[in-house]
Image (cartoon, rainbow, N blue to C red):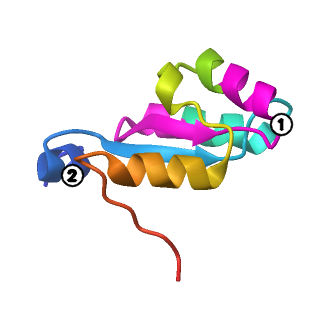
């Protein structure tokens, strides 16, 4: 067994998208920090606020690419699903 089974299995970090956890959120920052410390995950997209301006600004501030800092959940799901490498697991 390797120290990082995610990278061993996928050949890369698992890509994550987040909903919520933007400005003023304690738990959002904690989740991002834990994912980074674990080194098995890469945050690639998110909707960080229900306020469009704050969502975009917060996404850029944490390092999301401009086209992946979304302002609404359905827009993010549609755009990310259309990506060639997208795989989504949604709770049923």
**How far apart are the alpha carbons under marks 1 and 2?**
37 Å
Q: Which residue lies furthest to the bottom in this view?
A: 92
Q: Is residue 40 left or right of residue 10?
A: right
Q: Confirm whether the magenta stretch covers residue 29.
A: no
When asked about the image quadrant of residue 61, the answer is: top right
Crowding around mark 2 (Cα neighbors within 10 Å: few <14, some 14 to 19, many 20+) is few
Residue 5: mark: 2
Please provide the residue range marked out in magenta: 34-58
Residue at x 77% of width, y 33% of height? 52
Disc 1, disc 2: CB below 8 Å? Answer: no
Closer to us: 25 or 71: 71
Closer to us: 22 or 7: 22
Dot 2: element: helix
When asked about the image quadrant of residue 60, the answer is: top right
Residue at numbered disc 1: 51
Dot 1: element: loop
């Amino acid at each position: 067994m390797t120290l990082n089974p995610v990278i061993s299995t996928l050949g890369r970090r698992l890509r994550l998208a987040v909903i919520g956890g933007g400005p003023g959120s304690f738990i959002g920052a904690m989740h991002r920090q834990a994912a980074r410390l674990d080194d098995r995950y890469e945050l690639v997209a998110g909707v960080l606020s229900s306020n469009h301006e704050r969502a975009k600004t917060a996404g850029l501030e944490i390092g999301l690419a401009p086209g992946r800092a979304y302002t609404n959940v359905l827009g993010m799901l549609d755009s990310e699903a259309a990506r060639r490498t997208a795989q989504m697991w949604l709770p049923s």
